[in-house]
Image (cartoon, coloured by chain):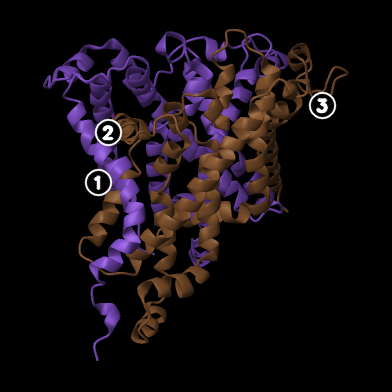
């Protein structure tokens, strides 16, 4: 091996290791600070476990079991409904022929550019007029469809040859039968990708909850964490315990299903 | 024989597939989008009485120093975030594309922060950036450097938010670029090496042009994503205080939130949203126009 490539290799490894530290240290600090008292958090930031460590911070989070339950509820319904609306829309956009199809799809794609804050005021009025302000149904309805998911599933459906559907149509099968019996069983991978994207999105969703939820007992987990921001006196221990609770489920999901996460991103980026 | 699939599907069938998703899109995205344009020309403040006031909201905005500042803050945030997301994403994609052992491990590790809650991550970084004895300052001290003010000074607050954003997002762009790199045909590299091109030449004459469609996609995603930043600003410098020390992290989407849901100036905030939307559309349009000059689609 030439000396040049040895230097190159060493520099590469050094950068990877430094970046690994940069990525892991904040996570390590959340995990360890959750079990420390206020003084130890700053005096021994990198010590794993001090003599004062314990689960006392978690005991202060008495409202969090409720927040977690609310998050599970909202995330579950949003994810299930999104899978339904995205896969049927994607079928209509890829395997059915109708006038205005492509124009409407372009409109869908363009709407991905719009920050939600830009449309939040009229959206808020719609929800208020439906009598849904301060309810979980508000969060579930505004999360009931996904343009990104529709896009991903449509990309997948377009790879399926039309001949599969044609023979079924000639046999007289209804489009819904074709969709449910033939197309959906083939779409397991892309559905898994959309499922975890949607889970991740709703588990972390903050802005809509901030706008639509007012009662403490209806708060979702990310919104519940603002309980700490409004206080003048900052207690970092309970904050880190709360952060840990919000991060662990989605981290476990990611570590067990990373293939789908990364596939979804990579496949959205490569243009034909 | 006529093949049935070449015919248009019946409207009833189309609607039965389309309507579930489209209703949500119509009610919660499309109609609000159109309404925002209307509300921007009123003095609506949530109550029953409101009237059309023409372009007065826009005139006030033009004169508002808070709006000027938030535009400037947004553009700074977008500029630095996009540049570093692209550079870091590309750098680590190239590093990991060398056929290292452990590529999958690093790829997953660097991508992981992207799936975590921005709210939880912001809490962690507010601990690290603590102005007194936060870990970031302890690290600086151990290198013999003076402590930084991080989130507590108007000079450094925006930079701190940018660092958190990069921590969460560079892995996402790395994955996009890795996908792009792996779709480049190896025969191009063989041809380049037969022609005697060195690594430097190969990167700029083969890799980058072949990567340009991916680059274009990544830049579009990055610009649009950066304009949307909210959670970090709210958690780290916003909250009840409002946009960081002296408004230094008051990005436009956060300012819209403040004006609508803290000050109830719905008309004014809608006008502000509209200006933001026009800016995003203009930038995206310029990008699409410009892509002809540098994006190569033929292989």
Foreground mark, 1 or 2, reads: 2
- The image shows residue B262 at horizontal and vertical percentages of 37, 16
- Tell me the SS state at disc 2: helix
- Relative side of A211 to B42, left or right: right
Q: Which chain is brown?
A: A
Q: Secondary structure at mark 1?
A: helix
Q: Earlier in the sequence, mark 1 or mark 2?
A: 2
- Tell me the distance, in whole angstroms, between the alpha carbons under discs 1 and 2: 18 Å
Residue at point 26%, 24% (across, down): B272
Residue B277 image label? 2
For disc 1, the chain is B
Q: Are marks 1 and 2 in contact (CB under 8 Å)?
A: no
Crowding at dot 3, Cα within 10 Å, few <14 / some 14-19 / many 20+, comes out as: some
Q: What tint does the image give chain B?
A: purple
Relative to B232, say whether A110 is above or below. below
Q: Nearer the viewer, residue B85 or B131?
A: B131
Which residue does the numbered mark 1 point to in the structure image?
Answer: B289
Report the side of A100 relative to A164 (left or right): left
C-alpha gap between disc 2 and disc 3? 47 Å
Q: Which quadrant would residue A99 be assigned to in this image?
A: bottom left
Q: Which residue is mark 3?
A: A48
How far apart are labels 1 and 3 at the CA level?
53 Å
């Amino acid at each position: 091996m030439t000396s040049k490539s040895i230097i190159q290799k060493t520099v590469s490894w050094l950068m990877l290791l430094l970046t690994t530290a940069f990525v892991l240290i904040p996570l390590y600090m959340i995990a360890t600070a959750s079990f420390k008292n206020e003084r130890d958090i700053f005096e021994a930031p990198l010590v794993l476990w001090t003599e004062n460590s314990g689960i006392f911070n978690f005991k202060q989070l008495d409202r969090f079991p409720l927040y977690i339950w609310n998050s599970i509820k909202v995330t579950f319904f949003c994810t299930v409904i999104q899978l339904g609306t995205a896969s049927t829309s994607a079928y209509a956009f890829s395997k059915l022929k109708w006038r205005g199809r492509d124009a409407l799809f372009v409109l869908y794609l363009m709407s991905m550019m719009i920050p939600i804050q830009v449309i939040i005021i009229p959206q808020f009025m719609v929800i208020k007029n439906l009598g849904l302000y301060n309810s979980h149904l508000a969060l579930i309805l505004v999360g009931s469809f996904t343009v990104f998911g529709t896009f991903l599933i449509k990309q997948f459906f377009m790879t399926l040859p039309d001949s599969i559907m044609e023979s079924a149509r000639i046999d007289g099968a209804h489009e819904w039968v074709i969709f449910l019996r033939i197309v959906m069983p083939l779409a397991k991978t892309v559905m898994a990708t959309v499922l975890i994207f949607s889970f991740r999105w709703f588990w972390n969703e903050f802005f809509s909850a901030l706008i639509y939820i007012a009662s403490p007992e209806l708060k979702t987990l990310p919104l519940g964490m603002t309980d700490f921001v409004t206080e003048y006196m900052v207690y970092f221990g309970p904050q880190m315990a709360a952060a840990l609770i919000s991060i662990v489920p989605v981290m476990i999901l990611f570590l067990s299903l990373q293939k789908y996460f990364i596939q979804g991103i990579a496949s959205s980026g490569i243009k034909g | 024989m006529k093949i049935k699939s070449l015919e248009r599907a019946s409207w009833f069938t189309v609607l039965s597939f389309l309507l579930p998703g489209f209703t949500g899109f119509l009610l919660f995205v499309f109609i609000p989008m159109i309404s925002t344009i209307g509300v921007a020309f009123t003095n609506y403040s949530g109550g029953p009485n409101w009237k059309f006031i023409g372009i007065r909201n826009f005139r006030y905005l033009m004169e508002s120093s808070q709006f000027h500042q938030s535009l400037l803050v947004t553009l700074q945030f977008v500029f630095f975030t996009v540049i570093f997301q692209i550079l870091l994403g590309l750098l680590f994609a190239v590093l990991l594309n060398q056929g290292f052992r452990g590529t999958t491990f690093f790829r997953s590790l660097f991508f992981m922060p992207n799936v975590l809650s921005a709210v939880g991550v912001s809490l962690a970084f507010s601990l690290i950036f603590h102005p007194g004895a936060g870990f970031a300052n302890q690290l600086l001290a151990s290198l013999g450097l003076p402590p930084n003010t991080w989130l507590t000074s108007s000079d450094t607050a925006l930079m701190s938010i940018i660092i958190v954003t990069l921590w969460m997002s560079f892995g996402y762009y790395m994955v996009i670029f890795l996908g792009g790199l792996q779709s480049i045909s190896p025969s191009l590299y063989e041809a380049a090496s037969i022609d005697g091109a060195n690594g430097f030449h190969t990167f700029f004459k083969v890799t980058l042009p072949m990567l340009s469609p991916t680059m274009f996609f990544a830049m579009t995603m990055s610009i649009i994503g950066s304009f949307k930043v909210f959670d970090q600003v709210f958690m780290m410098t916003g909250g009840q205080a409002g946009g960081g020390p002296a408004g230094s992290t008051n990005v436009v989407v956060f300012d819209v939130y403040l004006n609508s849901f803290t000050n109830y100036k719905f008309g004014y905030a809608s006008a502000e949203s509209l200006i933001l939307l026009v800016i995003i559309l203009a930038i995206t349009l310029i990008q699409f126009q410009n892509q002809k000059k540098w994006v190569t689609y033929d292989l």
